[in-house]
Amino acid sequence: MKILIANLGSTSFKYCLFTMSGSSQELLAKGGFERVTEYTPCIEEMLQTLTDDGHLSSPDDLDAVGFKTVLGKNLSGCVEADDRVLEALDGFKEVAPAHNPAYAEGIRCFRDKLPKVTRVALFETAFYQWMTPAEYSYALPKAWRDLGIRRYGFHGASHKFVAERSAELLGRQDVAERVRKLYIDGPGTFDAAPLRVVSCHLGGSSSVAGINNGVSIGASMGFSPQSGLPQNNRIGDLDSMAIPYVSKMLGLPIDEIERQLNKESGLLGLSGVSNDLRDITEAMDAGNPDAKLAYEALIDSIRHWAGSFLFKMGGMDALVFTAGIGENNPDLRARVCAGLQDLGLTIDPEANQIRGAEAVISTPDSKIKAIVIPANEELVIAREVLRFIQAK
Ligand code: ADP
């Protein structure tokens, strides 16, 4: 089965083509276009290239196209990318302005160009569908909540992969199987011994999720991906009263406030150096105090959220690190786990040197396991799309 994953940015179009059979998969091709103003010519060129290179016998040789849609109004899950999805993306275009219009246009282009090829949307919020109202509600007046303002959670594809893979690594095939079927059968009931995982997706954008027996019980990101941990150049959490206050004190209009919170905040705003943690740690090592502040604020926020989920689940069996920072920054991992010996988590300094590969980085006698699990979001989406098609 050939599955194409389309990654649509507001100015870019990237793709990966996988061939999937049973539990094995192979990346056949990947490519992309920058400075995109229209997707149709890119899609045509991509199909031509894939055909010329012999990966497809014709454009219709594709079995499905998968889209990592971000946020839909009144819709989540892994679903057919039909008019319902277009409507849901449109309903929240103001909340995810860089993503929703791009995905809506991309889905329409594929529909027009390849009407026979199945289109599947995997919402980034899908993994949090089973949070309870108490977990997802903000304490707002009803009229606000009726607009769909609530905690959704993002990076669902990545955290779900962590849920499945960590269960396999911890010898819990029952939980792994539950995760595999989650978007098809729902969570059902589960009576076996608990498996409590805290997953830290730390990259250009970052989030922490609590995962109880394969099902998420909470996310650091809320209504939009601008919340939770300090992001690369996006704010993370902020007390809502700061916005009217800064508007009055600095005379800033709402558009400018939004721009600064989305483009000039986060690690960039705190450090004044860069939105990339490599530049920030380099500046910190050279003695820059603002860079040190940014680094330490990120670590503090990770610990804050991880601690919150540990408490909520009544314990933690594994702490997982994934994505660019999580996979490649041993110092940050060590500092996130510092002083937790009494809780039962001890990092093995040697094992913790691993970069970009799967490994258990806690000591053999550590009651709580710390694990690095590399993210591969395109592959994760291809797997979900395959499961969706097979279930259909
Ligand atoms: P995105 O979220 O945009 O996909 P990544 O997951 O690659 O990005 O994460 C980007 C962050 O990860 C940056 O802050 C960067 O400093 C860090 N990072 C990525 N690769 C490495 C590496 N090899 N060594 C250290 N840090 C890295």
Image: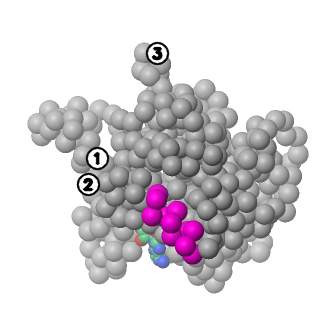
Q: Is mark 1 within 8 Å of ligand 1?
A: no
Res 160 visible: no
State the image coordinates of residue 27 (x, y, percent, origin top left). 64, 71
* Vertical side of 367 occupied by 97: above or below: above
Given residues 195 and 113, the one toward you in this image is: 113
Judged left or right of residue 265, residue 181 is right
Neighbourhood count class around disc 2 (C-alpha, 10 Å): few under 14, some 14–19, many 20 upward: many
The amino acid at mark 1 is: Leu
The amino acid at mark 2 is: Glu
Q: Mark 2 sits on what residue?
A: 264
Judged left or right of residue 179, residue 375 is left
Query: N-terminal of the two: label 3 or label 1?
Result: 3
Query: N-terminal of the two: label 3 or label 2?
Result: 3
Rounded to the nearest angstrom, the CA distance separating label 3 from label 1 is: 26 Å
Q: Are marks 1 and 2 in contact (CB under 8 Å)?
A: yes
Rounded to the nearest angstrom, the CA distance separating label 1 from label 2 is: 6 Å
Given residues 99 and 292, the one toward you in this image is: 99
Asked if residue 197 lies in the magenta stretch, the reply is: no
Marker disc for residue 142: 3
* Vertical side of 310 occupied by 292: above or below: below
Magenta stretch prevailing secondary structure:
helix
Q: Mark 1 sits on what residue?
A: 261
Judged left or right of residue 7, residue 254 is left
